[in-house]
């Protein structure tokens, strides 16, 4: 078993931005977002434990052990301060990392993060976990996206390659079952979220079919919110340029502020 999750690194610059994908994905989904930011920052994208090149590594068993494993890897890389970006399950992991080691996290950008409420479309997540071929993967991605979004070919290709690894598909099926036990997901208590002092931006698709956008209503008042009109759950694939710009802006913010609510289209 590998001691640390696999990560791909690129870019150059005084700040480091760390990307954590959602369940069933891999580091390659961040390709376009990372390319937009690579001229101004070092970018680091992980394959989460149980996924891709981190299929067998420390951190298996849920969001908390994954958070510990990635924090350990950041420590081994001697990265004292990083900006975290997490989508879906990766958002829950990023949040737990910020709670466990707030001094290491300069900013937190959460894209439709897990753990904000118990509601989840468990059937849809399990369908995605079991998607084996190109047609099934594409259909599952489309079902989790906005009504006018088409999954990018490079993402479909990357996920199909990942799922061909021995043991990968069964691992995803088992993880999805554990994550959606009783058709609910685990919740990070609001009182814990309220302790986060770094800039926090939460981005959510207004048409998210997996995690209801209403979960934003219970978030702490100092979290900034950005509702993406016409977008679904797959924000990285649906609006990579918008995501890159939001990350860029959040890495420049400081401190706790009152929450404005923004709206934007995914196009």
Image (cartoon, rainbow, N blue to C red):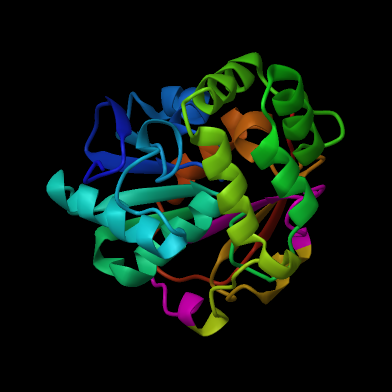
Q: Is residue 200 above or below residue 100?
A: above
Q: Write the start and end of the magenta stretch as one range.
A: 192-213
The residue under the point 37% across, 64% down is: 98
Would residue 220 be counted in the magenta stretch? no
Quarter of image, res 232: top right
Quarter of image, res 101: bottom left
Quadrant showing the N terminus: top left
- Residue 80 in the image, given as x and y percentages of width and height: 17, 54
Res. 27 in view: yes
- Residue 38 in the image, given as x and y percentages of width and height: 35, 26
Quadrant showing the C terminus: top right
The residue under the point 59% across, 66% down is: 115
Q: Is residue 79 left or right of residue 100?
A: left
Q: Is residue 217 above or below residue 155?
A: below
Q: Is residue 190 above or below residue 214?
A: below
Would residue 199 be counted in the magenta stretch? yes
Res. 78 in view: no
- Residue 178 in the image, given as x and y percentages of width and height: 59, 60
Quarter of image, res 243: top right
């Amino acid at each position: 078993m590998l001691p640390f999750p696999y990560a791909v690194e690129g870019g150059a610059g005084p700040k480091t931005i760390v990307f954590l994908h959602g369940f069933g994905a891999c580091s390659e989904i961040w390709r376009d977002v990372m390319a937009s930011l690579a001229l101004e920052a070092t970018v680091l994208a992980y394959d989460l434990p149980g996924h891709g090149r981190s299929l067998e590594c420390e951190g298996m068993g849920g969001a908390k052990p994954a958070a510990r494993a990635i924090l350990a890897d950041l420590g081994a890389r001697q990265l004292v301060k990083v900006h975290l970006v997490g989508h879906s399950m990766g958002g829950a992991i990023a949040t737990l990392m910020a709670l466990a080691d707030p001094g290491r996290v300069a900013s937190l950008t959460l894209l439709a993060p897990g753990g904000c409420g118990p509601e989840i479309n468990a059937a849809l997540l399990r369908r995605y976990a079991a998607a084996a071929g190109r047609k099934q993967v594409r259909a599952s991605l489309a079902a989790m996206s906005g009504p006018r979004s088409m999954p990018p070919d490079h993402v479909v290709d990357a996920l199909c390659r990942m799922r061909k690894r021995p043991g990968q598909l069964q691992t995803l099926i088992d993880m999805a079952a554990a994550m959606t036990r009783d058709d609910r997901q685990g919740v990070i208590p609001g009182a814990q979220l309220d302790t986060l002092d770094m800039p926090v931006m939460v981005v959510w698709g207004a048409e998210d079919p997996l995690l209801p956008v209403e979960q934003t209503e219970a978030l702490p008042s100092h979290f900034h919110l950005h509702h993406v009109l016409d977008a679904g759950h797959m924000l990285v694939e649906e609006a990579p340029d918008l995501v890159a710009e939001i990350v860029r802006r959040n890495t420049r913010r400081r401190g706790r502020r009152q929450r404005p609510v923004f709206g934007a289209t995914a196009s």
